[in-house]
Every structure is written in structure tokens, then in C-alpha cells.
Amino acid sequence: MAREAARITPPSGLSVNPQSAVPVHAQLTTQIRHLIATGQLKPGMQLPTVRQLAGFLRVNRNTVARAMAQLHRDGFLDGRAGAGTFVVEHPPARQGRAARTLDRLVGETLERARRLGFTHEELLATVAARAPRGRSVRTTRERVLLVECNWEELSRYAAELEAELPVAVERVLVDELPARIAQEPQLLRTHRVVVTTFFHVHEVKHAVAGALPVVALLSEANISTLLRLTELAEGVPVGLVCATPTGSQNLLRSVQSAGMGYLDPILASLEDPWSIDRMLDRTRVVVCSEQAAARIRERLPGDVEVIVFDRTLDRGGLDMLRDLLESSTEPRPGP
């Protein structure tokens, strides 16, 4: 016997604003996708009926039905005859870290707008007005090659790219790229573009040798991380920890490029336990990536402050890459 729909409560945090410049069905679709991506609506969980959601949100049933139909088409929901509507077992694309990154970005943007004296409605209206219109809908994902110096950043940036753009990302370490190209001649022929950050663009261009376009993206530190670092006194010792020495060197360059050159950096890596002990002899402030933080916290004394320095890809760079991918659908001839 099917579960009684009346016992199913609306998802926590679900709300719409009929006065917003963003259409109600789009608000509802986006929110439900986000609740699924962040795990607040779990696979297999049953949703209320269209009538129940419309009553809870005080909006037209047709509007809710339109949003639910879109979520069905996009592969987030599954309708079972006589049982109801459920979250699919394996929702597409925007999951886990990418969804949390987006959630953090929205929160930071809303807070910054508030500090500048703008209301949430003014921000939403501006976003709606600036949103690209008339873009063709792609049914396939373009293959791009993502090159970075460590697997942590490769995984994080790949998730961002696949969440934001119609791409399928293959990941390669920058140190391994020349050997991969030599061993697999088809590697470059099967991708539209090579993506990296500005830290490695010259290495990547040299390895690719003009066989593919190389797009270099800026990566930006979380604003809350930067604000905390600006509170530190000039010359204060700060530990910089990554999984590898190369990663620590890149973290140093990231901190310096963010204008934090006044700090006294102490580099350490998880590959070298002695370097961590040496670092802790001089400082009680540690800056590291989220992945490194998860591995190092248990080794640190309770009085050590851990500042997570994760970076996200610059929006302007993502828009530039999107325009490049959409500029031509013609197949690229192989080298």
C-alpha cells in the first residue's frame, strides 16, 4: 500500500517569493535541486504532492506542476504510479562539494550586498536582469582536459566545471601531462580545450604545443578566509600545509597573490611529518586546504587555529570558457 501523502511534510527551508524578479517556478526548481544536491532531500525520499506544495507555498498548482515536471525531465525526481514522487537514487551533476560551494558563494554575495546597503530583492532583480538569455541547450557535454598540480585541486575544480558548464572533465597532473601526451596521442584529439590555472599556463602550453586551445582561469580565495588572514599582524608566522611540497609552494603563491605577502610563511607537507613538527615549533596558525585540514587536525594541539584556504574558479573565467565552447560546434581537426 502506498505511503499516505498527507503525512509527508514539505522540505525544510523551501520557500518562494511571488514578488521576486525570478519566476516562481524557477525559484522552486532551483531550491529543490539544491536541497537534493546538499543532501537535505536524500535519495529515495518522497516529496509532497503538487497540491500539497502549492498549498504550503501559497502559489498556483500549475506553477508547482511546471517545476516538478522540469525536475523529472532533468533526472532529479522519479514518479511511481500509485506511490508518489521520489528523489532518484543517483541525482545528476550538481552534488556534494559543488553544491556546498554554490551555497557558500550565495551566502557571501548576500552578505556583501547587505553591507553595501542593497536589499536581497535588489540583488535578485539584478541577477535576473543580467542572466544570459537565448543560449542554445546542449544535449551533449564537451570533453575538456583539466590540468593542475595536485589531485585535491583537480577534484575540486573538476566538480565546479561540471556543475557550471556542459562539460565532461578528464583530469591530468601537470607533471604527468607531457608523458601522457607522448603515450596517448589521441588524448588531445578527443578534447575541445585544455583548462588550467594561471599558475601553470606556460607549462601546459609548452606541453600541448598548439594542438589545442589552452584556457587559463583565475582561482579566488573564499572571502571569509581572506578576511581572517587580514586580521593577522604583519610578520606573524603562519604555517602553510598541503599534501605535497609542491602543493605547499602553490599555496604560498596563492597567499602572496591574494596580497598576504606581509605574513611570515612556514611551509610544511603531509608527506614530511618532520616539517609539520618544525612548523608547530614556530606558530599556532595553520593555513591549509579543506582536504589537508581533515587529515591534519588530529595531529595538531588544541591551541592551533586552522584556516581553510580553498579556492574557487573565477566567474568571469567560467563565462569566457562557456563562450569558447559555444562559439563553434564544428569538430576540431586532429593534430
Image (tube, rainbow, N blue to C red):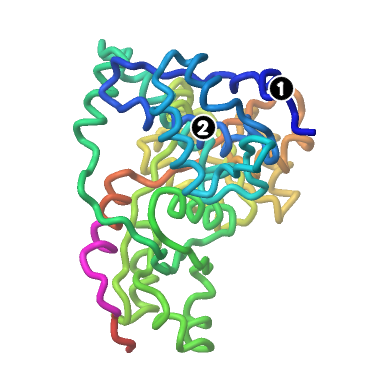
The residue indicated by pointer 2 is 32
> How far from the left and from the top, in percent, is residue 58?
44, 13
306 on left or right of 158: right
Residue 51, how many percent across, how many down? Answer: 52, 22
Against 334, is 154 above or below? above
Q: Which residue carries the number 1 mark? A: 303
At 22% from the left and 69% from the top, the residue drawn is: 328
Look at discs 1 and 2 and give the one toward the viewer.
2
Which x, y percent locates residue 125? 24, 23
Q: Decide whether residue 329 is among the magenta residues.
A: yes
Q: Which amino acid type corresponds to the residue marked 1 in the rendered image?
A: Asp
Tell me where the magenta segment starts and ends, as one range.
323-331
Q: In the rendered image, which quarter contains the C terminus?
A: bottom left
Q: Which percent across, then down, holds residue 93?
A: 52, 50
Q: Secondary structure at mark 2?
A: helix
Name the residue nearer the viewer: 45 or 328: 45
Q: Residues within 10 Å of mark 2 (few under 14, many from 20)?
A: many
Please report the residue visible at 51 percent of the width from the left and 51 percent of the height from the top: 159
Q: Disc 1 versus disc 2: distance between alpha carbons?
A: 40 Å
The label shown at residue 156 is none
Q: Amino acid at mark 2?
A: Ile
Which mark is first along the chain, 2 or 1?
2
Question: In the image, is 298 to the left or to the right of 137?
Answer: right
